[in-house]
Amino acid sequence: MAIDLEKGVYLDHAATTPVDQRVVEAMLPFWTERYGNPSSIYRLGRDAAKALNSARERIAGILRADPSEIIFTSCGTESDNLAIRGAAFAQRARGKGNHIITSSVEHHAVGHTVEQLVKKFGFEATFLPVDHYGMVSPDEVARAIRPDTVLITIMYANNEVGTIQPIAEIGRIAKERGIPFHTDAVQAGGALSLDVNALNVDLLSLSAHKFYGPKGVGLLYARKGTPLWPMQTGGSQERNRRAGTENVAFAVGMATALELAYAELEQTNNRVRALRDRLIAGVLERIPDVELTGHPTQRLPNSASFVVKYVEGEAMLLSLDMKGIFASSGSACTSMSLSPSHVLTAMGFPPEIAHGSLRLTLGKGNTEEEIDYVLDVLPEIISRLRAMSPLYQPAA
Ligand code: PLP
């Protein structure tokens, strides 16, 4: 099968995914015919409320949660903010303390939120270190717990290097100590189990656009009884936990996308993992001075991330773009920044190496031909860029 370079080879599924056609179909009626406000009491409103509740039930089924524990939000970032601010303020108001534990490799939606709580609201925080693979140690979590710890927030899988954290184990420690535990599962959604009981989590954030749903809708799972202040006040929607007229079409889209992802999970993961392994093996074999970043086995099935020495990440991306390949150098949210990735530096990479980061994240639309095409053009691109680098000394 020939590659359609007009369309391009999309290898940035950690940034976002195309919306599945079946999800588009499921959403369409809620903008045109079934457009009621779910809070209205007449038939059109009741119909919208029914669709919203059904979306909530379908999602709760996948998370093994109660539908009342699902709060729809506008994105993953909002879910993280609601979980962290909501729990931190509620806990402090109950006199529980003001110390938060997190990791040094979180997405900025978590990291910057915790930082602001420290700088502007008088909280204290421990940012746990990670090992060379980006892994948080459950023992370190246990050691960081203080009598005034009010919240632990550790991501499920990392968006830059794909490392999967030992969430169930960390959750067990948090549970034993009676501390609410939040996980940012935005990258894990659609790829890993989201069983909130097996994971021992009290709060879990998801975002639909990472699993072939629309951008601009997320959810927070909040276990019954978890202290949580609303961060947005107004109407009594979402059981007073998130005011604002619900986006019914997007809630239906998110539920449909999540259901499809979990119905097809094994098939998608096996296919994507095989392509990913072919890509990793090819890159390491054909290009000298490249290191795989993230954990070699405990990583998302679609994630291939590297540091390429003596090359700037941005230069690689522009050259790849000219060949019709869409990739990333770290996370999409930090791609406008000139400072090296906080994830790679926390993993011990010096800034000059972290600058050469390349993230290729696969999806269900990728083919073997596309991977082979990348493996053909990438070595040429890198040798050309290195030939221009004053730092590069090819092995004699
Ligand atoms: N958390 C992680 C781990 C992410 O990768 C992202 C998005 O890239 C987010 C949170 C934010 O999600 P959203 O784009 O829906 O705000």
Image (spheres, helix red, strand yellow):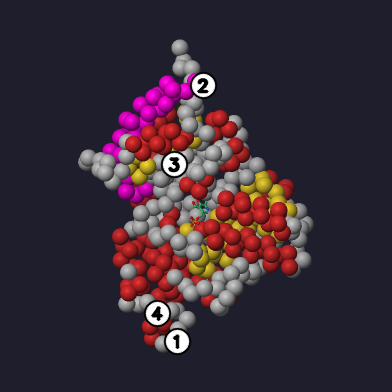
What kind of element bears circle 1? loop
* Number of other residues with Cα within 10 Å of mark 2, as a class: few under 14, some 14 to 19, many 20 or more: few
Q: Residue at x 32, y 36 (%)?
A: 323
Q: Residue at x 61, y 51 (%)?
A: 111
* Residue receiving disc 2: 391
Amino acid carrying mark 2 in the image: Leu
Spatial CA distance of label 1 from label 4 is: 10 Å
Sequence-wise, the earlier of marks 2 and 1 is 1
Q: Nearer the viewer, residue 98 or 264?
A: 98
**Position above or below: 289 against 54:** above
Between disc 4 and disc 2, the foreground one is 2
Spatial CA distance of label 2 from label 3 is: 23 Å
What kind of element bears circle 4? loop
* Residue receiving disc 4: 36
Amino acid carrying mark 3 in the image: Ser
Does the rendering let one see residue 382? Answer: yes
Q: State left or right for residue 351 relative to residue 47.
A: right
Sequence-wise, the earlier of marks 4 and 3 is 4
Between disc 2 and disc 3, the foreground one is 2
Spatial CA distance of label 4 from label 3 is: 40 Å
**In magenta segment, residue 194:** no
Disc marking residue 328: 3
Q: State left or right for residue 164 relative to residue 373.
A: right
Does the rendering let one see residue 154? Answer: no
Sequence-wise, the earlier of marks 3 and 1 is 1
Spatial CA distance of label 2 from label 1 is: 69 Å
Q: State left or right for residue 161 relative to residue 140.
A: left
Sequence-wise, the earlier of marks 2 and 3 is 3
Disc marking residue 41: 1
Q: Nearer the viewer, residue 195 or 272?
A: 272
Predominant SS along the magenta part = helix
Q: Over which residues does the magenta segment extend?
A: 363-390
